Image: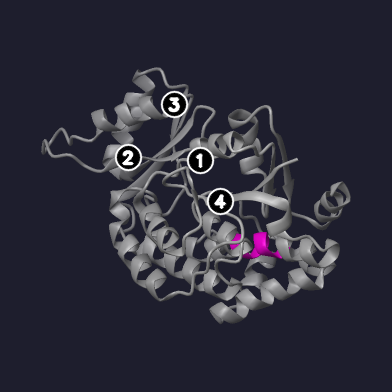
């Protein structure tokens, strides 16, 4: 078995996340305490008790998902002597999950990752005035069709000027998410329906992530990442924006800045990891979104998720 460890992004959060890990494993509990200390906030209490609407604020969601993922990694290490460098060929993460992947691989420490993700969430939220941006899922569309729909939807019929509407996530299996100015995204939904796309719908998100409107957030992250300590990961990361592996800290910094406005090329990331010999994909942290996508993107591969104490124990028995 050649393992790839993959780390989830926004949408996988839920009230109660990680509480059972903290109860079961001291090493997991320590991660949540580290994140609380780094942020000077009882984020763990918000994760475990809610309210949901506060947990869903992107500035909370991003460090919370990283904390859950790293709690799983630390539990694997403490309970079974698991070492990522010895057992895993590649890591990758979906959007903010790329920070979790890099932290699991030792490129960031947990406190640094928590602070960067808090800043990333705040900067993405501030990048556009509330209500001016939107994201939509096109189900049953492939990336080229989605890009063509965006190109048709960009011109504002009243002004004749182009508005931002771009492919944000190529998740694979006929699932593409688009992002941009609200009116342009709404036009794209109507065009998609007319083009025979199975389903096109607005997503309940607070900002238009992974498009050119996020440029102010990319600038904020460039400044923060320039000051952050970033080591070479012990396992290469397959980057969202290139779908290629990276290990050089200078390159990784640059890729994380580009990722804020760039397309998350998840379908290609999975294909690249499979082509590099990975046959077992392990989703580490909250939910099973990536495990579900894996069945469509790499049907021959084994896909499993580790998010709870029973998952940790079951996985360690397989090694």
**Residue assigned mark 4:** 93
Left or right of residue 123, residue 288 in this image: right
Secondary-structure class at tag 1: helix
In the foreground, 253 or 30: 253
Q: Do the residues labelled 1 and 4 touch (CB within 8 Å)?
A: no
In the rendered structure, does residue 70 fall within the stretch colored magenta? Answer: yes
- Marked residue nearer the N-terminal end (1 or 4): 4
- Residue 73: quarter of image: bottom right
CA–CA distance in space, label 2 to label 4 = 21 Å
Categorize mark 2 by other alpha carbons within 10 Å: few (<14), some (14-19), many (20+). many
What's drawn in magenta, residue-wise?
65-71
Residue assigned mark 3 = 142
The x, y position of residue 271, in whole percent, is 55, 34
Label whose residue precedes the other's in the sequence (2 or 1): 2
Circle 1 residue? 266
**Which structural element holds mark 2?**
strand
């Amino acid at each position: 078995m050649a393992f790839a460890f993959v780390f989830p992004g926004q949408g996988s959060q839920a009230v109660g996340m990680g509480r059972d890990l903290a109860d079961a494993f001291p090493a997991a509990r320590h991660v949540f305490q580290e994140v609380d200390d780094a942020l000077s906030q009882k984020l763990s209490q918000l994760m475990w008790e809610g309210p949901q609407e506060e947990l869903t604020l992107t500035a909370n969601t991003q460090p919370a998902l990283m904390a859950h993922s790293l709690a799983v990694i630390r539990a694997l290490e403490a309970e079974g002597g698991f070492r990522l460098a010895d057992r895993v060929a590649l890591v990758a993460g979906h959007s903010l999950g790329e920070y979790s992947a890099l932290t699991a691989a030792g490129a960031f420490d947990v406190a640094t990752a928590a602070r960067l993700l808090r800043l990333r969430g705040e900067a993405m939220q501030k990048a556009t005035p509330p209500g001016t941006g939107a994201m939509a899922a096109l189900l049953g569309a492939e990336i080229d069709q989605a890009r063509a729909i965006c190109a048709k939807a960009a011109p504002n019929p009243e002004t004749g000027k182009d508005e931002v509407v771009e492919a944000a996530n190529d998740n694979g299996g006929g699932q593409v998410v688009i992002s941009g100015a609200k009116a342009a995204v709404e036009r794209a939904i109507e065009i998609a329906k007319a083009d025979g796309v199975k389903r096109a719908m607005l997503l309940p998100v607070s900002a238009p992530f992974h498009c050119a409107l996020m440029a102010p957030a990319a600038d904020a992250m460039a400044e923060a990442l320039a000051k952050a300590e970033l080591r070479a990961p012990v396992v290469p990361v397959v980057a969202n924006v290139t779908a290629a592996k990276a290990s050089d800290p200078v390159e990784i910094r640059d890729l994380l800045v580009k990722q804020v406005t760039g397309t998350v090329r998840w379908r290609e990331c999975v294909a690249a990891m499979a082509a590099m010999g990975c046959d077992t994909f392990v989703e580490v942290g909250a939910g099973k979104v990536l495990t579900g996508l894996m069945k469509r993107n790499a049907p021959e591969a084994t896909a499993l998720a580790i998010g709870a104490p029973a998952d940790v124990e079951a996985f360690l028995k397989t090694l």
